[in-house]
Amino acid sequence: MTAALRFNNLTLGYDRHPAVHHLDGAVNTGALMAVVGPNGAGKSTLFKGIVGVIKPLAGRIERGELAARDITTPACLAASTARLATASRTPSPRSA
């Protein structure tokens, strides 16, 4: 299986304040992956780097044959936002 995304010594952040430090790894084509962590851990920052909204402070992101614009489109963002909005309004089941 080939890597769709590769991270090489990737550091992402804002105004020289890193949120993601020295990330190395790969995401294979077709892989299902979860990015989890506490508030402020850099999850959103990582996704912003993947789609090209922010540039790395150091290192790089290899997208293989994908361009950042191919990873997300306005339609994908609208659908994701709608799903998140629906999920946030759905009450969680209470334990008995």
Image (tube, helix red, strand yellow):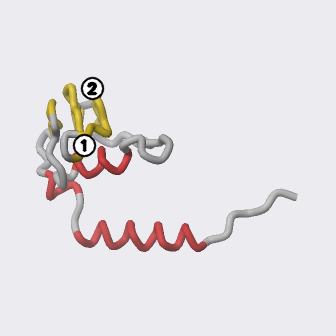
Residue 20 coordinates in the image, percent (x, y): 31, 36
Q: Residue at x 47, y 42 (%)?
A: 36
Residue found at x 11% / y 43%:
65
Q: Quadrant of residue 62?
A: top left
Which image quarter holds the C terminus?
Answer: bottom right
Across and down, in percent, residue 91 comes to: 67, 69
Marks 2, 1: nearer the viewer: 1
Residue type at numbered disc 1 = Gly
How busy is the neighbourhood of tag 2: few (under 14 within 10 Å), some, or many (20 plus)? some
Residue underneath mark 1: 13
Q: What residue do we see at 78% from left, 61% from top? A: 94
Q: Is residue 96 above or below residue 50?
A: below
Q: Quadrant of residue 78?
A: bottom left
Q: Nearer the viewer, residue 26 or 42?
A: 42
Side of 9 relative to 79 (left or right): left
The quarter of the image holding the N terminus is top left
**Residue 71 on image: x %, y %:** 22, 55
What's the amino acid at mark 2? Asp
